[in-house]
Image (spheres, coloured by chain):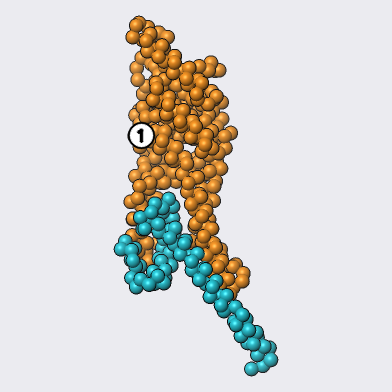
Chain colours: A cyan, B orange
Amino acid sequence: MDGPEFWRNVADVFEGMALSGHRRQLRAEALELEDLFLLMCFMDLMGLPNPGALYLLDVYPYLVEEFHLWHRRMGFDRSPIASFSCC
Amino acid sequence: MRHLLDRRVLFFGGKGGVGKTTCAAAFALAASREGRRTLLVSTDPAHSTSDVLETALGPTEREILPGLAGLEIDAAREARRYVNEAKSRMSGLFGPAVLAEAARQIELASAMPGVADLAVFDRMSDLVLSRAGGYDLLVFDTAPTGHALQLLRLPDLLSSWVEALTRRRREGLEARAIAAGADAPGARGADPVLGILEARSARLSAMRAELGRADRVAFVLVLIPERLPLEESVRAAHEFSEAGIAIGGVIVNRVLPDAASGGYFEARKAQERVYLEEIERRLPPVPRALVPQLESDVHGLAGLDRVRACLVAESQPRG
């Protein structure tokens, strides 16, 4: 391991120590924001009126994957919504 | 109401049965006679426009006379088209499993009430924003008042919703980018969801801005001198002004002619005078046109021509 690379690694270690807790918090925050977005897109599935549902038909396929990650994160092995079973 | 001839978009509306369709068709005829290339569009599911013109109109433009074309928006057909277009846009982009699931969500969404309204609105936006066909004037014959109002308010309702979604999406993406350690959220533009949301948002804002242009767009209230249409028109005038859509004129249809005489008609005319006075006082101070009750009902171009003459008569006295 030569000089510059060594110091870059040292810098990485310090940066990781300083930021890891912070990053975890940021990730949690990012997930919360994404959940809020999903809720707004799928409100009709929860029985709430969704004024945008029809206007966003072509957004849904992009959200199938995110929806799947969400229900896994919430502790549902399978999709909790009968009409939207992504797995 | 000659002042309305130089607008780009006119909506004719009022309570059911007051003669919206006749007045819209007569005004479109007037405009085309004045050399304005005019498209008459019916959004009323009753679709009486074909009957008034005695010409079959369809979902695509069809020439009625030189300089005058017409079409009837079929809500069910537009809804199907709208859903199918959304499906075909995505078909090349995803695997079959994702498409199957998304298709279920789409079917669910398109069964919701409102799909027809939205599809009609979408078609209307196309006509207004694209200016395809090079028309000088678009005349919309709308569904009865409440429904027309709901339709014209859609961009307001939807745009705040879509803007909120766009904001959430952007915040989520930025938070994720920062959490992942990429300080520059430059990859943001690559998110297809955000791309779709922003495009929709832009289209809604364009439609809202256009509807708010009082120099180009106006709503024409049609009523008959009777209590219920009068009250509904007063409410509608108030609600349209709140929605930021200008009332450009008032047409009082089926006013009893002077020639009608005898005890029965004198009594009706006395009552009518009360309503005409109220129309003068309670509706916005915009030009009025009075159309008399004719000896026969109006259909066909000859009948329309008589109504046309009333609508564009020079300086009609107000009330």
Question: Residue placed at 34% from the left, 68% from the top?
Answer: A79
Location of residue B7 in the rendering, given as x and y in whole percent from the top left corner = 55, 32
Q: Nearer the viewer, residue A57 or A24?
A: A24
Location of residue A11 in the rendering, given as x and y in whole percent from the top left corner = 65, 84
Q: Nearer the viewer, residue B295 or B236?
A: B236
Toward which corner of the image does residue B268 lie, by quadrant?
A: top left
Residue linked to disc 1: B47
Location of residue B11 in the rendering, given as x and y in whole percent from the top left corner = 47, 33
Name which residue type carries label 1.
His
Q: Is residue B211 above or below residue B278?
A: below
Q: Is residue B298 left or right of residue B207?
A: left
For this orientation, the residue located farthest to the left is A82
Check the residue under mark 1 and report the chain it is in: B
For this orientation, the residue located farthest to the right is A3
Question: Residue placed at 37% from the left, 10% from the top?
Answer: B267
Count all numbered tags in the image, as a single digit: 1
Q: Is residue B234 left or right of residue A21?
A: left
